[in-house]
Amino acid sequence: QVQLVESGGRLVQAGGSLRLSCAASGRTLLGYAMGWFRQAPGKEREFVAAISATGGNTYYTDSVKGRFTISRDNAKNTVYLQMNSLKPEDTAVYYCAADGNSGSVYVASRRAYDYDYWGQGTQVTVSS
């Protein structure tokens, strides 16, 4: 079992930056692809970013490309989401997730149903 705990969410003004962290416990994240998803009020959960187990490949939804950066520190068993130039439409609960069955350490999925473990989420609110 992998337990994931997100942190770093808060209220921020448009144009500001935040760094979300996702700390894992229970077992090492080595071999797990990791993803960040978000869910805004009244909307479905959507893919934000993902990183392969090796950290060598990253994936982003179009709306955050150039503004968000996903990274991982396997020694700290932690995944990060650096968010810059935040917009009001980025307001959502952000979840991290772990996929232990990606089939390759070089890829990561954009699909929520591929992820086995989820954190409880952290609220990000961007004011205009």
Image: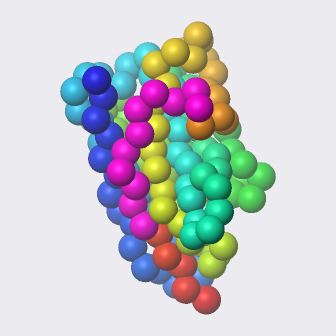
Q: Percent x, y for residue 35?
A: 53, 38
Q: Which residue is the extreme one toward the bottom?
A: 128
Total number of numbered labels?
0
Check if residue 90 falls in the magenta segment.
Answer: no
x and y, in percent, of residue 10 in the image: 39, 73
Q: Residue at x 54, y 66 (%)?
A: 92
Name which residue lies at 64% across and 29% down: 109
Q: Quadrant of the C terminus?
A: bottom right
In the rendered image, the residue lying farthest to the right is: 62
- Tell me which segment is drawn in magenta: 113-123
> Residue at (74%, 59%) from the top-left corner?
63
Q: Relative to 45, is 53 above or below?
A: above
The spot of residue 88 in percent (x, y) is 63, 78
Closer to us: 125 or 64? 125
Residue farthest to the front?
Answer: 42
- Check the picture and name the quadrant holding the N terminus: top left
Q: Is residue 123 left or right of residue 58?
A: left
Q: Is residue 54 toward the left or the right of residue 111 in the image?
A: left
| Picture layout, residue 54 above or below residue 39 | above
Residue 96 visible (yes or no): yes
